[in-house]
Image (cartoon, rainbow, N blue to C red):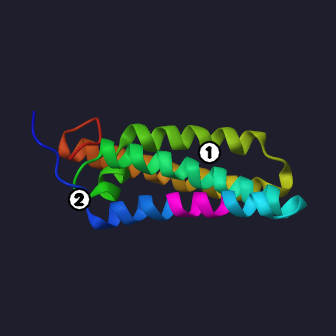
């Protein structure tokens, strides 16, 4: 098994910033009254979610070029397209424009990822 490259300072700073924001919003949520405390708790939960997602991505995609690897990932693009279509179908008319835009963007991303994987002869999106 190959040794994994060490994490960059940018990855460490990202995780530390998300952990710090989570802690700050949690502490602020305890001390703030009413809806401000609830909003702070929701932001703390969002930071916790992003912390977990970033950790998973950093472990799954070692080394530099994480964004490019994820952009070429056909399964990720296809799953995003499915979610965008489901949100489009379940959204009321006043917000439909947002999810039409999201669906078009993710369809273009999926097409680009498929084209790139077919051009390079790979089907799993890895370089």
Other residues around mark 1 within 10 Å, as few (<14) / some (14–19) / many (≥20) = many
- Which numbered tag is attached to residue 13? none
Q: Is residue 55 above or below residue 22?
A: above
Real-space CA distance between mark 1 and mark 2, rounded to the nearest whole angstrom: 28 Å
Q: Which residues are magenta?
A: 19-25
Judge depth for marks 1 and 2 and give the one in front.
2
Mark 2, other Cα within 10 Å: few <14 / some 14–19 / many ≥20: few
Q: In the figure, is residue 104 to the left or right of 25?
A: left
Q: Which residue sits at x=42%, y=63%?
A: 14
Q: Which residue is mark 1?
A: 84
Q: Is residue 45 left or right of residue 81?
A: right
Q: Residue furthest top?
A: 1
Q: Would you identify the image quadrant in which residue 26 lies? A: bottom right
- Front position in the image: 38 or 101: 38
Residue 126 quadrant: top left
Magenta stretch: helix, strand or loop mostly: helix
């Amino acid at each position: 098994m190959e040794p994994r490259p060490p994490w960059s300072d940018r990855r460490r700073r990202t995780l530390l910033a998300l952990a710090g924001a989570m802690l700050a919003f949690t502490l602020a949520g305890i001390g703030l009254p009413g809806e401000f405390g609830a909003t702070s708790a929701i932001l703390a939960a969002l930071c916790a979610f992003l912390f977990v997602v970033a950790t998973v991505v950093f472990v799954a995609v070692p080394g530099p070029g994480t964004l490019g690897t994820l952009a070429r990932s056909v399964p990720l693009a296809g799953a995003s397209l499915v979610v965008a279509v489901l949100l489009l179908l379940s959204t009321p008319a006043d917000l439909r424009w947002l999810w039409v835009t999201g669906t078009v963007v993710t369809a273009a991303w999926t097409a680009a990822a498929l084209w790139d994987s077919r051009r390079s002869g790979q089907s799993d999106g890895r370089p």
